[in-house]
Image (cartoon, rainbow, N blue to C red):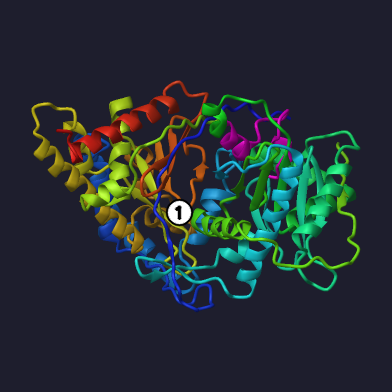
């Protein structure tokens, strides 16, 4: 099986950070409220407002009639709303389980690029396998230390805008795995794993990381085991079994079931699934110029570079995978059904702080078991990079929300490239509610459209454009507040649709409308990811003719990762990246005109 050839280059980005509180509260979820079900009329009104910048008025007439029938006397709306409110009273979270099932587990798209995000971190100061193994040992020890913090209830509750966030996802980062199925996937979690999986040259090893007395192995012990794995991984023919996990989910689900009929295969697969996490020791890749290095590095983390590169060194179903290359490159990728960006960023912050310190543990003089070789019986996107010479401090100097400022820039850049606005979504965390995951903030608004249409008009004064910019930003801030308070429209609309299906009713016309299809064809998927370091997260677009933009803000610069599929001639990540760069510079000029 062949992983589609994908080329990649990365970029500089920008982001907002979830603040860790100093609270000593230990519980993961009881301190946060249940996620509310928004009022039906509010969501439908918001849906109509969201459609206004996207479709002509004559098409809105039909949608308004459908909404009136849906929520009027005899319509399904009130009945479905009552069902959602009843569900909310009797469940941990009325939408999260549905969302995970619908958005992830029922998706049949391959996991690499289409679903699993990757984070590429700054290059380390080594360039051979010796340095690779030393750093990998430190990395493993740091991850185990973080797990110990989580397991012992010492992880501080995180806060956003002064409100505590749900911490339920943290224990699930370890020993979790997605299991492929023919029609839908499932998730498995093992609470007592004592090993990790190490993969090198397409060969998988089960490596214990705890001593017989229950203590965590020291860095020296881990390093000794990695040396043994390196020596052992030269001996046999290399079959890239991991490449199977990059397949279409139905194809992989069928192959998975056949694979597990063999006892040896089943034991090996189960060992990978039960492991705390996977460490991928990547082989060197073709050297490239310095300006393309960060892009090649991000591509390696995201998908491994193809069958003949390092894609066989992955098990894409695994919740957490660390990647360390011989050239000093490193990062991680994760599976979204169980993990999300903010908890991953907290993990990375811990790892980076741990790596600055010497090994705090003395190595015990006890023999170590040989890592177990796992045997098997064998039966997209283009990110581009640049540097912005200002960061989140610029909009803050003008009392503007940095995230909303970036969203305006993205909408303006997209319009400059494609001469239209499109259905766009920014990811909003719902972790301030018990069991909460995410919702969408819809970027296009009437205020945003008005600013975009007048930006290049020389007859409009600078003062007028500034006022339109502020109106667009303030509108987006209000939508952000609405989403963070559990009052956004998209998960509510999805819940109404799924409630109808659960009650055995016909899908309401509202969701069969052309306007609904257009409004949910997300050509621009965006997300800010919390990080304290110059890391770059990248993920693929939601639709074939779309873009994905991830950004990570620092005080004086912004990192962007922009991806689009090679197969689509309409989208060009390089063009959008260059246009976004010039657009941000133009917005800087608008805020701070040169004399």
Residue nearest the viewer, comparing 220 with 81: 220
Vertical placement of residue 384 versus 142, above or below: above
Question: Where does residue 177 sit, x and y in percent of width and height?
Answer: 68, 54
Neighbour class for label 1 at 10 Å: few (<14), some, many (≥20)? many
- The quarter of the rendered structure image containing the C terminus is top left
Vertical placement of residue 382 versus 390, above or below: above
How many badges with numbers are in the image? 1
Vertical placement of residue 235 versus 571, above or below: below
Residue that extends furthest to the top in the rendered view of this protein:
569
User: Pointer 1: what residue?
Assistant: 530
Query: Residue at left 52%, top 25%?
Result: 566
Question: Where does residue 585 sit, x and y in percent of width and height?
Answer: 28, 33
Residue nearest the viewer, comparing 175 with 582: 582
Would residue 60 appear left or right of 224 to someone viewing this image? left
Q: Is residue 263 magenta?
A: no
Question: Where does residue 80 sit, x and y in percent of width and height?
Answer: 38, 61
- The quarter of the rendered structure image containing the N terminus is top right
Query: Residue at left 43%, top 26%?
Result: 574
Question: Where does residue 568 sit, x and y in percent of width and height?
Answer: 48, 24
Q: Is residue 521 visible?
A: no
Quadrant of the rendered structure where residue 139 is?
bottom right
SS for callout 1: loop
Residue nearest the viewer, comparing 444 with 303: 303
The magenta segment: 296-315
Query: Residue at left 49%, top 50%?
Result: 533
């Amino acid at each position: 099986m062949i992983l589609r050839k994908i080329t990649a280059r990365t970029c500089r980005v920008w982001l907002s950070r979830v603040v860790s509180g100093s609270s000593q509260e230990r519980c993961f979820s009881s301190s946060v409220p249940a996620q509310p079900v928004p009022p039906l009329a509010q969501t439908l009104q918001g849906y109509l407002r969201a459609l206004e910048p996207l479709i002509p008025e004559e098409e809105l007439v039909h949608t308004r009639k459908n909404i009136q029938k849906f929520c009027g006397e005899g319509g399904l709306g009130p009945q479905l709303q009552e069902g959602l409110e009843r569900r909310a009273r009797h469940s941990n979270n009325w939408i999260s389980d549905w969302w995970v099932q619908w958005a992830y587990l029922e998706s049949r798209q391959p996991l690499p690029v289409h679903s699993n995000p990757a984070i590429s971190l700054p290059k380390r100061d080594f360039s051979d396998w010796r340095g690779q193994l030393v750093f990998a040992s430190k990395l493993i020890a740091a991850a185990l230390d973080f797990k110990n913090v989580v397991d012992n209830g010492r992880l501080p509750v995180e806060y956003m805008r002064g409100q505590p966030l749900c911490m339920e996802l943290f224990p699930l980062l370890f020993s979790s795995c997605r299991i492929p199925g023919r029609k839908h996937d499932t998730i498995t979690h093992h609470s007592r794993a004592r090993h990790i999986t190490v993969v090198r040259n397409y060969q998988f090893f089960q490596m214990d990381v705890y001593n017989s007395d229950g203590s965590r192995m020291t860095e020296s012990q881990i390093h000794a085991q990695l040396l043994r794995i390196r020596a052992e991984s030269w001996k046999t023919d290399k079959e890239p079994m991991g490449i199977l996990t990059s397949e279409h989910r139905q194809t992989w689900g069928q192959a998975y079931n056949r694979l597990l009929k063999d006892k040896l295969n089943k034991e090996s697969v189960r060992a990978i699934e039960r492991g705390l996490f996977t460490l991928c020791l990547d082989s060197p890749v073709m050297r490239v110029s310095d300006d393309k290095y960060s892009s090649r590095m991000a591509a390696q983390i995201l998908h491994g570079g193809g069958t003949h590169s390092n894609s066989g060194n992955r098990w894409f179903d695994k919740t957490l995978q660390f990647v360390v290359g011989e050239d000093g490159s490193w990062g991680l990728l994760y599976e979204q059904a169980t993990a999300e960006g903010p908890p991953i960023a907290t993990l990375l912050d811990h790892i980076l702080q741990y790596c600055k310190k010497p090994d705090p543990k003395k190595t015990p003089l006890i023999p170590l078991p040989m890592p177990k070789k796992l045997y098997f019986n064998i039966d997209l996107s283009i990110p581009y990079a640049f540097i912005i010479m200002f960061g989140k401090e610029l909009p803050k100097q003008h009392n503007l929300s940095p995230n909303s400022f970036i969203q305006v820039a993205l909408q303006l850049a997209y319009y400059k490239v494609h001469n239209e606005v499109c259905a766009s979504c920014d990811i909003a965390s719902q972790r301030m509610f018990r069991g909460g995951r995410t919702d969408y903030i819809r970027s296009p608004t009437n205020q945003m459209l008005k600013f975009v249409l007048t930006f290049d008009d020389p007859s409009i004064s600078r003062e007028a454009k500034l006022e339109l910019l502020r109106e667009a930003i303030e509108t987006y801030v209000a939508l952000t507040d609405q989403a963070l308070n559990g009052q956004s429209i998209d998960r509510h609309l999805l819940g109404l649709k799924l409630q109808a299906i659960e009650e055995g009713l016909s899908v309401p016309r509202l969701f069969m409308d052309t306007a609904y299809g257009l409004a949910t064809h997300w050509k621009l998927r965006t997300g800010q990811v919390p990080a304290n370091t110059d890391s770059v997260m990248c993920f693929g677009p939601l639709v074939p003719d779309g873009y994905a933009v991830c950004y990570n803000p620092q005080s004086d610069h912004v990192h962007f990762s922009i991806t689009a599929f090679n197969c689509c001639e309409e989208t060009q990540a390089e063009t959008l990246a260059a246009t976004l760069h010039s657009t941000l510079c133009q917005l800087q000029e608008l805020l701070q005109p040169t004399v």
